[in-house]
Amino acid sequence: MEKTTQAKLYEWASYVIIVAATVYFFVSKKEVTITMLGIVLALFCRNMMYRVRYKMCEDENEELKVDLRRLTNLLEVAKKENKSN
């Protein structure tokens, strides 16, 4: 599964769980344990969403670093060729 899809899935799952916990709280009248469990689960989903987004940014930064190194090496080679000619 792609990381963008995974992040969206975690985001929407947290929204659905929060809404379901809220509805359950008002329907059950005083059933706090399951509501709090739902909120904790929603927070876990949000945490996972931010973790996946962080990993996406980290991977992109790593790719950019590799590209920067490659371009720097090409620039050095081009400068050496210009000095030789």
Image: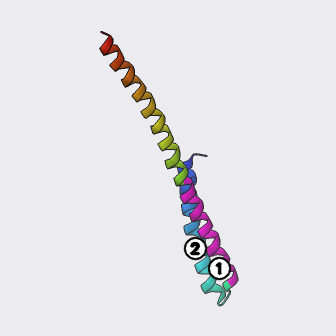
| Residue 33 quadrant | bottom right
Tell me if 58 is positioned left or right of 38 in this view. Answer: left
Tell me if 53 is positioned left or right of 31 in this view. Answer: left
As rendered, which of 25 and 3 lies closer to the eye? 3
- Identity of the residue drawn at 59% across and 80% down: 23
Where residue 62 appears, x then y in whole percent? 50, 41
Height in image: 57 above or below 25? above
Where residue 35 appears, x then y in whole percent? 65, 80
Height in image: 59 above or below 54? above
**Label 1 environment density (alpha carbons within 10 Å; few <14, some 14–19, many ≥20):** some
Q: Amino acid at mark 2?
A: Ile
Separation of marks 1 and 2 at Cα, in angstroms: 10 Å
Q: Amino acid at mark 1?
A: Met
- Identity of the residue drawn at 62% across and 84% down: 25
Mark with earlier residue (1, 2)? 2
As rendered, which of 34 and 48 lies closer to the eye? 48
Outermost residue, bottom side: 30
Instruction: Tell me the element at label 2.
Output: helix
| Residue 13 quadrant | bottom right
Q: Is 18 colored magenta in this rendering?
A: no
Please report contact status of discs 1 and 2: CB closer than 8 Å, yes or no. no
Q: Is 44 colored magenta in this rendering?
A: yes
Main secondary structure found in the magenta portion? helix
Which label number is shown at residue 18? 2
Residue of label 1 = 36
Outermost residue, front side: 83
- Identity of the residue drawn at 45% across and 38% down: 64
| Residue 10 quadrant | bottom right
**Residue numbers of the magenta segment:** 33-52
Instruction: Tell me the element at label 1.
Output: helix
Height in image: 17 above or below 55? below
